[in-house]
Image: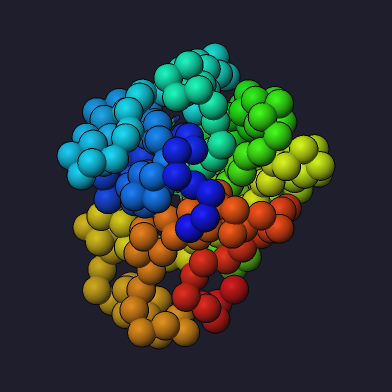
Amino acid sequence: MRGLNGKVAVVAGAAPGNIGGATAVRLAEEGMLVVAADLREATAQAVADEITASGGTAVGRGFDISDEQSYQALIEFTVERFGGLHGLFNVAADLSPQTIGRDTDVISEPVEVWQRTIDVTLTGYMYGIRHALPIMIKQGSGSIVNTMSSSVWMGEPEHVAYQAAKSGLVGLTRHTATLGGKHGVRTNLLSPGVILTETAIRSTTEEFREQIMASVRAPRLGRPEDIAAMVAFLFSDDGAYVNGQSLLVDGGANFT
Ligand SMILES: NC(=O)c1ccc[n+]([C@@H]2O[C@H](COP(=O)([O-])OP(=O)(O)OC[C@H]3O[C@@H](n4cnc5c(N)ncnc54)[C@H](O)[C@@H]3O)[C@@H](O)[C@H]2O)c1
């Protein structure tokens, strides 16, 4: 894709086999200098090692998206290391059993689960934008991609905090698109459908996958690389006139 070679990207939520990891790999293949970041430093480092081993440029770094100072330090590290910041992919989510596993319905939701989900998936994304946007505006270019989920449009009967936090990204994205747009900084929202990450392959049943397969207008289920391709497009000059949009990458699923 055009305009990515030599530019700098942060992938905030990258582990091998997940959406962030596949995106970091794709961006590096396009010639971007990549900072792969995650709560688990070792997994971020593993992504960076994979990229470096295949001739790309990447560093791995631990950070906590729910801690503003930690996210600020990640952005500052990136600019110091690579001399700028052109693409920010906010993709982290707390999908642990303690959080998403206890994220029920609005009547019985534990408040700490609600709070943790908002802290990671909404406030955390805001921290990244708050510290990246001034750098991109000064530079006169940049692209931010926030990750929502097709499940928001389904109105699932559980995962109330996840849906509320992800929905908040609509406003955050459109606000940021307005703030940055005239300065050449675009912000978009990407909603994956069901994507077979390594974790999803391990944790879903054949029956569930067949159910999803029946609902997509595609000959296969989604892969992390499908999302990576859309992020690469949105970061590139080919996506130069796409700003403030909400894009579903779900194989044309018919449950949304
Ligand atoms: N996989 C799917 O089917 C699917 C569908 C719809 C939306 N999504 C969204 O796509 C994104 C990626 O999903 P995934 O399937 O790759 O999930 P994942 O759990 O593999 O990736 C999320 C990453 O965020 C990291 N993380 C969690 N808390 C963090 C924190 N406090 N600070 C920094 N990093 C933290 C995790 O360690 C993990 O590596 C998420 O935002 C998810 O909500 C995924």
Residue under the point 61% across and 43% down: 143
Residue furthest left as drawn: 53
x, y percentage for residue 20?
Answer: 39, 46
Looking at the image, residue 70 lies above or below residue 101: above
Which image quadrant for residue 82?
A: top left
Which image quadrant for residue 85?
A: top right
Q: Return the residue nearer the eye: 40 or 99.
A: 40
Which image quadrant for residue 184?
A: top right
Tally of marks:
0
Looking at the image, residue 84 lies above or below residue 207: above
Q: Quadrant of ligand 1?
A: top left
Residue under the point 41% across and 64% down: 226
Q: Return the residue nearer the eye: 106 or 30.
A: 30
- Residue 164 appears in the figure: no
Q: Return the residue nearer the eye: 167 or 224.
A: 224
x, y percentage for residue 1?
Answer: 48, 58
Residue 7 is left or right of residue 49, and the answer is: right
Please identify the quadrant where the C terminus is shown: bottom right
Q: Return the residue nearer the eye: 154 or 173.
A: 173
Residue 16 is left or right of residue 158, and the answer is: left
Residue under the point 38% across and 69% down: 222
Residue 200 is left or right of residue 125, and the answer is: left
Residue 53 is left or right of residue 199, and the answer is: left
x, y percentage for residue 128?
Answer: 58, 29
Q: What colouring does the structure picture have?
A: rainbow
Looking at the image, residue 200 lies above or below residue 51: below
- Residue 252 appears in the figure: yes
